[in-house]
Image: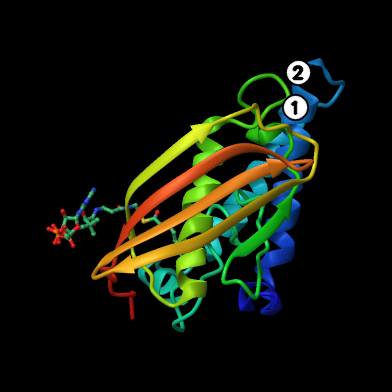
Amino acid sequence: MTMDLQTERCGVDGAAAAARRVIDALVRAGDISGADMAGIADRLNAVADDLEAQAPPLRDRLVNMWRGDGNTRHDPAAGPENPIAPPLAYTGRPDGSIESDVTLGLPYQGPPSSVHGGVSALLLDHTLGVANGWAGTSGMTAELTLRYHHPTPLFEPLTVTARQVSVDGRKIRTTGAIAAAGRTCVTAEGLFIAKPLPRPR
Ligand SMILES: CCCCCCCC(=O)SCCNC(=O)CCNC(=O)[C@H](O)C(C)(C)COP(=O)(O)OP(=O)(O)OC[C@H]1O[C@@H](n2cnc3c(N)ncnc32)[C@H](O)[C@@H]1OP(=O)(O)O
């Protein structure tokens, strides 16, 4: 079952996807390309000027971002509204786990042709959090333990999975992994504490 995060559509999604494409193309081109980088900077700054001039007050945008009670759309891992999110798109499995297939490019590079360890941590922290929501009991990350078994490749399909393991009072334990071609690259164990922060209203 696909989660509601993916079924809702907003106008900003298309612009965010274009910005994501620009980030990827910029990192890909670099200074060894023939691109007119000064001209590109001017054009990108003009876009930013336009957006900044029309942005609502910060508080209004925060309320808008946190509307409703379910998944949000702005986070840096799965948020379709956020250009720095790959973004992950989750499918819930009948066994209570969740899964997302994603291919990461150069903006997420750490070691050569491999995913940055901090990016893997971001994706796993968020995916464990979403798995908690999928299981019905959510919390704040209190501890996140990662084990990097093998380099996680860029440019190849990755599968990010997570599953809530137990709920003991306010303590929620959740595990997850990133795999490439059936090989586990990173595993995660998280302790979450049930303590909802109020959403801006
Ligand atoms: C769909 C959306 C998915 C989003 C996923 C993204 C998740 C995130 O990134 S969350 C952001 C990162 N996390 C944070 O910022 C959390 C910051 N920390 C906090 O807010 C608090 O320390 C918090 C909520 C973890 C715990 O605070 P608090 O509610 O006061 O806990 P407290 O009452 O002291 O302790 C409760 C129990 O948890 C235990 N505990 C608390 N913190 C920890 C910890 N870091 N490690 C181990 N145990 C802990 C305590 O020992 C206590 O256990 P016991 O009941 O056995 O004595």
Where disc 1 sits, the SS reads helix
CA separation in Å, label 2 and label 1: 8 Å
The residue shown at (65%, 65%) is 90
Left or right: 129, with 18 as reference point: left
The residue shown at (66%, 71%) is 93
| Residue most extreme to the bottom | 68
In the depicted structure, whether residue 88 falls above or below residue 60: above
User: Within the image, what quadrant is residue 32 found in?
Assistant: top right
Q: Which residue is mark 2?
A: 31
Left or right: 37, with 48 as reference point: right
Residue 13 x/y as whole percent: 69, 66
Q: Nearer the viewer, residue 132 or 87?
A: 132
The residue shown at (64%, 32%) is 115
> What number of labels is visible?
2
Image depth: mark 2 or mark 1 in front: 2
Q: Quadrant of ligand 1?
A: bottom left
Amino acid type, label 2: Asp
Residue 51 x/y as whole percent: 59, 58
Residue 89 x/y as whole percent: 68, 63
The residue shown at (73%, 24%) is 113
Where disc 2 sits, the SS reads helix
Q: Are marks 2 and 1 in contact (CB under 8 Å)?
A: yes
Mark 2: few/some/many CA within 10 Å (<14, 14-19, 20+): few
Q: Looking at the rendered structure, which numbered label has been put on residue 37?
A: 1
